[in-house]
Image (cartoon, rainbow, N blue to C red):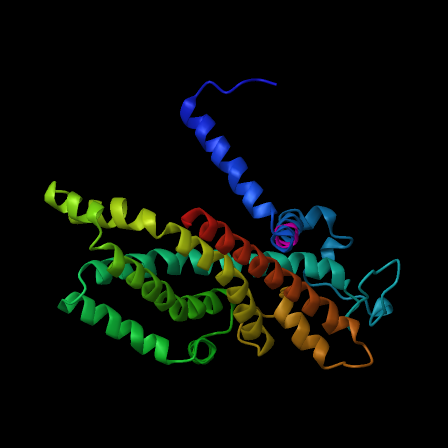
Amino acid sequence: MPTINNPMLKRRMEALRKGWYKFSKNPVSVVGLFFVLAVSFIAAFAPYIAPYPQHAGRFVNFADASQPPSWKHLCGTDVFGRDILSRIFFGFRYSLMMGVVVLSLVVPVGVVLGLIAGYYRGTWIDTVIMRITDVFLAVPPLILALAVCSVLTPSVFHAMMAVSLMWWPWYTRLVYGLASSLRNEFFVQAAEVAGASRSHILFREILPNCVSSIFTKMSLDMGWVILIGSALSFVGLGAQPPTPDLGTMVADGSKYLPDQWWIAIFPALAIMITVLGFNLIGDGFRDLFALEET
């Protein structure tokens, strides 16, 4: 086995081994990690592993319509004869894309606003940022997303924008509390005395001490964002047919319950597994970072 001569790389590898050891001590979190990796793999290689990849688009085969689960169609077919398992594989793509895009937009905005408001606590900057944040937090998230989507053309892009609009205040509130407590620490005061710039203090001194909490919330929020996106699609304000979105598939299948139960049940189980996987990973990260802080 080759040896690692770089001391920095060696320390990082050792930290990764210790982190995995602590994370793996929680078997439930490992199960969540398996779910997420499986869903991510399926989403990435859906065109190659789906039994009928052509069924993810505009496809109709009434000869095989409404077929129950069988060896030919493991999850059955819908009323248009499309293979449900193949559409679930492609539906994972839109669910993961919703979570990744939304968090990529809201985390930087929320974190920066929270850092600024927390560092300048007690000033007019703090008042303006946090009062705007409180206004958004006062409105139930799903209601706000439904209101935004209802005035726009239903699409995946507009659903992402609506969820992003309602999600950034949670990161602002989280980082605000962390930055408010860290601004009086000795290392921050030492940086101020040394003449460090405000940006250096915010992003090099305070932010690194907030990363664990932010990362844990991101892993938990990934599941919630997917769930909210599926809810918007369920009421017709997200992805539109024939896009194989899981929420849309559940909505279409619910019309045929209980006789053709497989049309709605299997996409709903796919949503449950995805959300559960991210929530279990989030719990594992929370326990991991809590152990490191003690």
- Is residue 58 positioned above or below 199 on the image? below
Magenta-colored stretch includes residue 38 = no
Residue 112: quadrant of the picture: bottom left
Residue 107 at what x, y percent from top left? 38, 58
Q: Which residue is drawn at 47% across and 64% down?
A: 157
Q: Residue at x 19, y 64 (%)?
A: 121
Can residue 242 be seen in the rendering of this structure?
no
- Is residue 167 positioned above or below 183 on the image? below
User: Relative to the observer, which residue lies in front, 66 or 199?
Assistant: 199
Residue placed farthest to the front in the image? 294
- Main secondary structure type of the part rendered in magenta: helix
- On screen, residue 143 versus residue 44, left or right, reads left
Quarter placement of the N terminus: top right
Q: Which residue is drawn at 41% across and 67% down?
A: 167
- On screen, residue 149 versus residue 27, left or right, reads left
Q: Which residue is drawn at 14% across and 66% down?
A: 123
Magenta-colored stretch includes residue 32 = yes
State the extent of the magenta-drawn residues as a range: 31-36
- On screen, residue 216 versus residue 134, left or right, reads right
Residue 111 at what x, y percent from top left? 32, 57
Disc tally is 0
Residue 105 at what x, y percent from top left? 39, 58
Can residue 117 be seen in the rendering of this structure?
yes
Residue 145 at what x, y percent from top left? 45, 75
Residue placed farthest to the right in the image? 71
- On screen, residue 120 versus residue 44, left or right, reads left
User: Relative to the observer, which residue lies in front, 11 or 279?
Assistant: 11
